[in-house]
Image: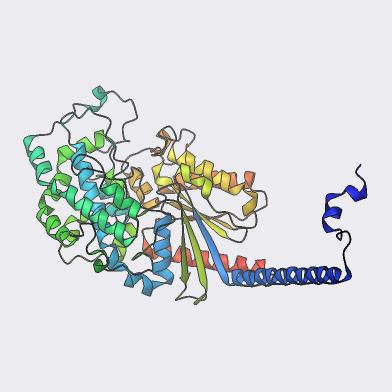
């Protein structure tokens, strides 16, 4: 054991040898000043912690979690529509370019699918449009059923399983010169796509997306999917003003956005024709391209969206696809309800597998977990071996078992119920994809089974006893979702009061 005289700390603070009285006075004064400064810093830190705690008591934090395309961004839009309606209406027009881009991408997916070699299986449409359903094409079950073609021809029990031989599917339809001519007349949409992505990249102040646009050749390669990154400025969307076009004059960007309306009007009839063509529909079905279930689908609204004076409706904004990467934070000061004036901070977390490691878990927040239950017959875009419903169950298990979230309320949204009911009504059997299911092939039967599954996982894996909060949702239905969010608001407010011992 070292001697006391050899201790490094003792040696460091020991007065120097041969110290004069004057030097000692100076040293002691310096030590006193340093101690005073240290105590002052400690006081400032304590004051800041107290101020932060006070602000957190006045602010509600909500995390939106779930796999990619589960509807998290749509919940944000619904929240703004319900509680910050003035800001929502002010920004409504700014969604026009995104809605147009959603429509153009859908048409270009169809054009890419119409190849002479229909056995070609390397069609990569993930960069165009995610295969999994994010938004119902409309909000009534009757309308959703019509989009799944339940009234036209024999009902299909399911989409073909991988590996199903062609002999069981019948002959592959062949494209004709009529289809080739349609593709040719729709080719200007490739340029429209580039213009719209450039325009949106400028609105979001994202130079990396602009650079990516210029690396691709129109009509030969697929543009990267339009995404909002965690470091992207949300100009013009969800509460922030657009940058004016004049800000970009003189740059290399072709902001000929005004020509988009004219091109879309000129291509209107061809877009309608190619979408309604029965041969095209069968080709899409055989290639498992489910545009009618996909996010941002406006193929049944072509006439309205291609009008020169088109302005997005509230429903259009809710249905528009805006993919987020990373974590987006939104701050709202409520304009209505009992919490009027209170700040809500909502975090939209990207749900792709390679983004989940960056999810921010706070010990003073509450969670809304979205599980898209209509995609029971689909696989993850990032891993074709994993069923989407199974992935949601595993993700729910991980969230429930987190000790960092043991003091947080977790609210489960079983989302896409309208699309689920339309699928079941069309004849698709839930038991074909979930063999353990032995209930009725109806919305009530399937949702009852799934609620039991999620409840059992929470009970088995939660580190503390929790109340199971579950809502059946179709987040593109503004009216029903508004009621659900109001109940969520009350729950979060009550939990916040309990945390500060006021209840």
Q: Residue 382 at x, y = what percent?
A: 41, 38
Q: Residue 242 at x, y = what percent?
A: 31, 67
Q: How many marks?
A: 0
Q: Residue 174 at x, y = what percent?
A: 14, 31
Q: Residue 374 at x, y = what percent?
A: 39, 45
Q: Is residue 187 above or below residue 362?
A: above
The quadrant of the rendering that contains the N terminus is top right
Q: Quadrant of residue 76?
A: bottom left
Q: Is residue 468 above or below residue 285?
A: below
Front residue of 41 and 47? 41
The quadrant of the rendering that contains the C terminus is bottom right
Please give left or right for residue 412 compared with residue 363 in the image: left
Residue drawn at point x = 65 percent, y = 57 percent = 407
| Residue 299 makes an appearance in the image | no
Q: Is residue 319 above or below residue 239?
A: above
Please give left or right for residue 482 compared with residue 198 in the image: right
Coloring scheme of the render? rainbow
Residue drawn at point x = 45 percent, y = 46 percent = 67
| Residue 67 makes an appearance in the image | yes
Please give left or right for residue 461 compared with residue 472 in the image: right
Front residue of 228 and 320? 228
Residue drawn at point x = 61 percent, y = 70 percent = 57
Residue drawn at point x = 6 percent, y = 36 percent = 177
């Amino acid at each position: 054991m070292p001697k006391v005289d050899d201790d490094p700390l003792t040696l460091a603070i020991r007065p120097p040898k041969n110290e004069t009285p004057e030097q000692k006075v100076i040293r002691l004064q310096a030590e006193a000043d340093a101690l005073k400064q240290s105590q002052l810093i400690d006081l400032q830190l304590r004051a800041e912690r107290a101020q932060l705690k006070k602000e957190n008591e006045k602010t509600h934090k909500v995390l939106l979690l779930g796999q990619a395309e589960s509807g998290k961004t749509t919940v944000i839009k619904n929240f703004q529509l319900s509680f910050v309606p003035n800001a929502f209406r002010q920004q409504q027009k700014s969604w026009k370019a995104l809605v147009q881009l959603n429509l153009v991408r859908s048409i270009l997916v169809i054009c890419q699918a119409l190849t002479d070699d229909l056995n070609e299986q390397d069609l990569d449409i993930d960069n165009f449009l995610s295969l999994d359903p994010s938004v119902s094409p409309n909000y009534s079950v009757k309308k959703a059923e019509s989009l799944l073609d339940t009234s036209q021809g024999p009902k299909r029990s399911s989409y073909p399983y991988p590996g199903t031989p062609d002999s069981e599917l019948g002959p592959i339809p062949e494209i004709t010169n009529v289809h080739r001519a349609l593709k040719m007349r729709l080719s200007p949409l490739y340029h429209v796509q580039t213009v719209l992505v450039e325009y949106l990249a400028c609105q979001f102040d994202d130079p990396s997306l602009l650079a990516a646009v210029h690396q691709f050749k129109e009509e030969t390669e697929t543009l990267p999917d339009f995404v909002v990154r965690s470091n992207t400025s949300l100009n013009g969307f969800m509460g922030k003003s657009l940058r004016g076009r004049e800000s970009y004059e003189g740059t290399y960007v072709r902001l000929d956005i005004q020509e988009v309306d004219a091109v879309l009007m000129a291509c209107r009839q061809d877009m309608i024709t190619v979408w309604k063509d029965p041969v095209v529909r069968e080709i899409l079905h055989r290639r498992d391209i489910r545009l009618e279930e996909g996010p941002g689908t406006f193929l049944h609204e072509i006439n309205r969206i291609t009008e020169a004076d088109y302005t997005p409706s509230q429903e259009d904004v809710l249905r528009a696809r805006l993919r987020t990467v990373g974590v987006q934070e939104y701050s709202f000061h409520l304009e209505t309800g009992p919490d009027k004036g209170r700040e809500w901070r909502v975090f939209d977390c990207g749900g792709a597998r390679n983004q989940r490691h960056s999810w921010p878990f706070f010990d003073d927040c509450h969670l809304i977990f979205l599980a898209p239950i209509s995609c029971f017959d689909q696989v993850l875009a990032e891993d074709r071996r994993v069923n989407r419903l199974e992935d949601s169950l595993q993700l729910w298990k991980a969230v429930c078992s987190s000790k960092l979230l043991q003091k947080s309320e977790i609210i489960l949204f079983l989302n896409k119920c309208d699309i689920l009911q339309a699928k079941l009504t069309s004849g698709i059997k839930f038991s074909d994809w979930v063999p353990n299911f032995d209930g009725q092939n109806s919305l009530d039967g399937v949702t009852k089974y799934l609620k039991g599954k999620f409840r059992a996982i929470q009970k088995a894996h939660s580190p503390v006893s929790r109340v199971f909060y579950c809502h059946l949702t179709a987040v593109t239905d503004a009216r029903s979702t508004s009621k659900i969010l109001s109940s969520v608001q009350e729950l979060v407010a009550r939990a916040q009061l309990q945390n500060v011992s006021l209840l």
